Amino acid sequence: MIRISEVFSEFTNQIITGIGAKSARKLGSEYFLVRTNDPHEIQESDAGKFIRWNLPIQHSWPCNPEQMEGFVEKAAQAIYRKFGKLTFQAIFIGQLDPGASNRYYKSLASNLRGRALQLFPQKIAEFKEIEAQNSEVPTLFCLVGKEGLFCGVQSPKAANGLYPGGTKYISQSAPDTISRAGAKIAEALHYLLMHRSAPAKGSHWLELGASPGGMTSELLGRDYKVTAIDRAPLDKRLDHHPGLRFFLSDVATFEPKGRTNFKAILSDMNGEAQDAIRHVIRLSKHLSHGGLVIFTLKTPGVATFAEINESFVAVVQSTAAAGLRLFARTHLTYNRLEFTLFFEKDSLS
């Protein structure tokens, strides 16, 4: 099973072909059941960056749960019969159509997980925190929807997400929310946990293209220090924040003073990807060894599947030459027609 965001719907056939799939059946709004020779190579292919989440299906039950009496008990028993002798760290069950306004399947997924946990060993039942998973250790993931139940065992890292389906929902309804970009960096930091630890509290971030301050606010709320750069002002709610230094300036002309050093660089700048990454590369000399770069690869004016891939390759090649190693890339829930790339500064650069 693979998940392709609706924003890439016009590229669906090219993505499915690009991962070597032989056939595809659509499930819900974003999922597809595909047959491929080597499922482990999905994320490594050129088309893999378009795959939000993937799972080898080891048990499926095509049905309509709403029309079936006793579905939760029957499904839980079937899951136990199929997976009861296998070793995995946790059981997590989500809904096949994550954007559905009907809460029936969200409740059904929760009830099914609760009953399944009662059938499995206590060591599984005690595992409650999704983000406490070891990203390298297999988890039993299940998705349920009007098309039925689909389950498989895979590590979160191989699946490309800690949550079933890969989505971590982040509320944007708080009265102090500045912009949706705050949810984007919150999700990016959540995703980062599968690959390495986040910078420690108190670490200094350099944020390029910060206005109006949604990401800035999220970083400050996590007890980071932030130097933010933009030609447009930040939201006034950030005025006088003790952890913030803001420069109303063009990123192209900004240069930190003296021996200023950063633990991380964040770039969500609009415009051409090559222009944005050049600024990141230039300023990475102020990034500590092993420092983190989170970069939004935006695709303005890019119209085709091939052009998106070419832009991605060009960015990765230029950063590699500058000593920035790409260690993860994904399409987040809060991304539009763009990708989030994660780099680490080489200790020798």
Image (spheres, grey):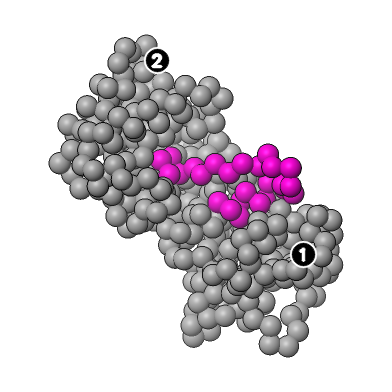
The vertical placement of 231 against 153, above or below, is below
Q: Name the image quarter holding residue 86.
A: top left
Q: Residues within 10 Å of mark 2 (few under 14, many from 20)?
A: some
- Which secondary structure, mark 1? loop
Instruction: Look at mark 2 in the image and give the residue it sits on.
Output: 66
The vertical placement of 132 against 56, above or below, is below
The residue depicted at 61 percent of the width and 71 percent of the height is 202
Q: CA distance from mark 2 to mark 1?
A: 51 Å
Q: Name the image quarter holding residue 188.
A: bottom right
Q: Is residue 180 magenta?
A: yes
The residue depicted at 49 percent of the width and 59 percent of the height is 192
Q: Position of residue 341 (x, y in %)?
A: 54, 60
Q: Earlier in the sequence, mark 2 or mark 1?
A: 2
Q: Position of residue 99 (x, y in %)?
A: 54, 31
**Of residues 126 and 200, which is closer to you in this image?**
126
Magenta highlight: main SS: loop
Q: Position of residue 97 (x, y in %)?
A: 48, 29
User: Would residue 22 be visible to someone looking at this image?
Assistant: no
**Image quadrant in which the N terminus is located:** top left
Span highlighted in magenta in the image: 163-187
The vertical placement of 239 against 78, above or below, is below
Amino acid found under the numbered disc labelled 2: Glu
Q: Which mark is residue 241?
A: 1
Q: Position of residue 289 (x, y in %)?
A: 53, 81
Q: Residues within 10 Å of mark 1 (few under 14, many from 20)?
A: few
Amino acid found under the numbered disc labelled 1: His
